[in-house]
Amino acid sequence: MNPATITLALSKGRIFDETLPLLAAAGIEVTEDPERSRKLILPTSRPEVRVVLVRATDVPTYVEQGGADLGVAGLDVLIEHGGAALYQPLDLGIARCRMSVATRADFDYPAAVRQGSRVRVATKYTAIARQHFADKGVHVDLIKLYGSMELAPLTGLADAIVDLVSTGSTLKANQLVEVERIMDISSRLVVNQAALKLKREPIRRLIDAFGRARPEQAS
Ligand code: ATP
Ligand code: MG
């Protein structure tokens, strides 16, 4: 591969979709639709820039290990991964949602917390949940799940879940209530440290263009 090539790791779905306008602002157009193509490496209108499609949770690994020079990953994914080796120059302000605690409507969460009882918490986000309840001094039994966390309180597997919420309609459809907001989540640009040194100019230009193009209210 040409040493001047810039590889950007994205996940399909909302991160890909919401990164497209930022790329466009940098003069980069992705010339193939990932929902139609089976390709995992997508060319762009700029011969030196390509996009690799990876699972959202794999973006930090690709960028950290140099499989990609840059990537876009949710703050949730970055915290769970432990992002110490990654340069994180920008909050892109895209894929916004929040990390929250939810329970069944008939579970008295404030009382459980007040009484210091052990709360059974099911989540995919064990690092965030562990830290949150440790900060509150609440004893928890964490149950690691990989999907459909809403089912856990409904089946008696757990008292509460820690999950991403945007509109709240999934919680509502399953008769769960959001009882505590843990943190606001958005997606961040992450950069490989060595690539930043070796390809400083083109990467800087990308960071600057993304910074100017990101939606209002991004910090
Ligand atoms: P997969 O769906 O492949 O299991 P995933 O759930 O991590 O993986 P996405 O659903 O595309 O992948 O989510 C990617 C990122 O978008 C998440 O890490 C999070 O930061 C953010 N996100 C997740 N759900 C929402 C939502 N409902 N609204 C806005 N942003 C969200
Ligand atoms: Mg998902």
Image (cartoon, grey):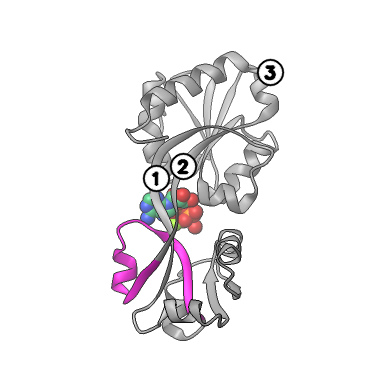
Q: Does the residue labelled 3 lie within 8 Å of ligand 1?
A: no
> From the image, which quarter does the C terminus lie in?
top left
The residue under the point 59% across, 63% down is 126
Earlier sequence position, callout 2 versus callout 3: 2
| Residue 30 lies in the magenta-colored region | no
- Mark 1 or mark 3, earlier in chain: 1
12 and 183: which is toward the camera:
183
Residue 169 found in image quarter: bottom left
Amino acid marked by disc 2: Ser
Give the amino acid type for the residue marked by disc 1 in the picture.
Ala
Q: Name the quarter showing ligand 2.
A: bottom left
- The span picked out in magenta is 158-179
Quickly name the residue at label 2.
187
Residue at (43, 26) in percent of width and height: 210
Q: What residue type is labelled 3?
A: Leu
CB within 8 Å, label 2 to label 1 = yes
CB contact under 8 Å: marks 2 and 3: no
Give the alpha-carbon distance from disc 2 to disc 3, as whole Å: 25 Å
Label 3: which secondary element: helix
How far apart are the alpha carbons under marks 1 and 3?
30 Å
Q: Name the residue under label 3.
A: 198
The residue located at (47%, 75%) in the rendering is 160
State the residue in front, 215 or 148.
215
Which corner quadrant of the image does residue 164 belong to?
bottom left
Return the x and y of residue 3 as percentages of the image width and height.
Answer: 67, 18
